[in-house]
Image: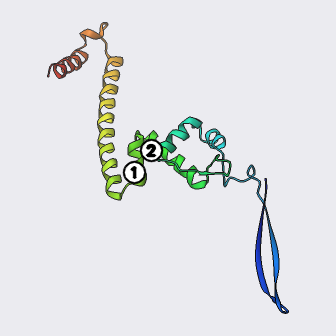
Amino acid sequence: MRIIDVVSCRSAAVGDGLVDMTTRIVLNVDMKSTAAVWTIGELAARSGVARHVLRHWESEDLLSPQRSTAGHRRYRPDDVYRVATILLAKEAGLGLGEIRAMTTGSAQQRTAVLHEHRAELRNRIAAAQACLALIECALECDHEDIGTCPHFRAAVAHRVTALQR
């Protein structure tokens, strides 16, 4: 793509009068060869995030790409960094509201969100470890019928008690 910008200016006096000069500035910009600006399609393809998801993140104030003169989204390196941040936070289990608070909120808000999420993760990890222990016990059990295994029966009794509360 070739962008030509013409700027008119008045220059210093020559003789008795001013001389009008026109300066021509020519910039050669190849949008496809530079990683400085990506279209929504390029960012979607490179990040594995669907276009509609990028638009949704924009509507949630998580992204704010610049626009071309034709109104097309243009993603710059800071937007790409933001997408990577969102993906990483989503992998950690954070929701969009939590991600917004973490990335645009105060240090106090970020800390509160992360403390709360850490507690949730610890609870899920403990539950997953209990499930893993039950599965390992069942795999090592010598009982023909899992329902007769004392460890399995104790786990079921514990669940029944929890349901009755």
Q: Tell which of 103 and 71 is nearer to you.
A: 71
Circle 2 SS class: helix
Residue extending farthest to the left is: 165
Give me the C-alpha separation between circle 2 and circle 1. 9 Å
Mark 2 and mark 1 lie on one chain; the one further toward the N terminus is: 2
In this picture, residue 42 sits left or right of residue 27 = left
**2 or 1: mark nearer the eye:** 1
Give the percent coordinates (x, y) of residue 108.
Answer: 31, 57
Q: Tell which of 92 and 65 is nearer to you.
A: 65
Q: Tell me, yes or no, if residue 87 can be seen here.
A: no
Give the percent coordinates (x, y) of residue 33.
Answer: 75, 51
Mark 1 neighbour density, 10 Å: few (under 14) some (14–19) many (20 or more): many
Q: Tell which of 62 and 14 is nearer to you.
A: 14
In this picture, residue 103 sits left or right of residue 35 = left
Residue identified by numbered label 1: 102
Residue positioned 77% across, 72% down in the render:
8
- Residue 55 is tagged as none
Residue identified by numbered label 2: 89
In this picture, residue 143 sits left or right of residue 76 = left
Give the percent coordinates (x, y) of residue 59.
Answer: 49, 42
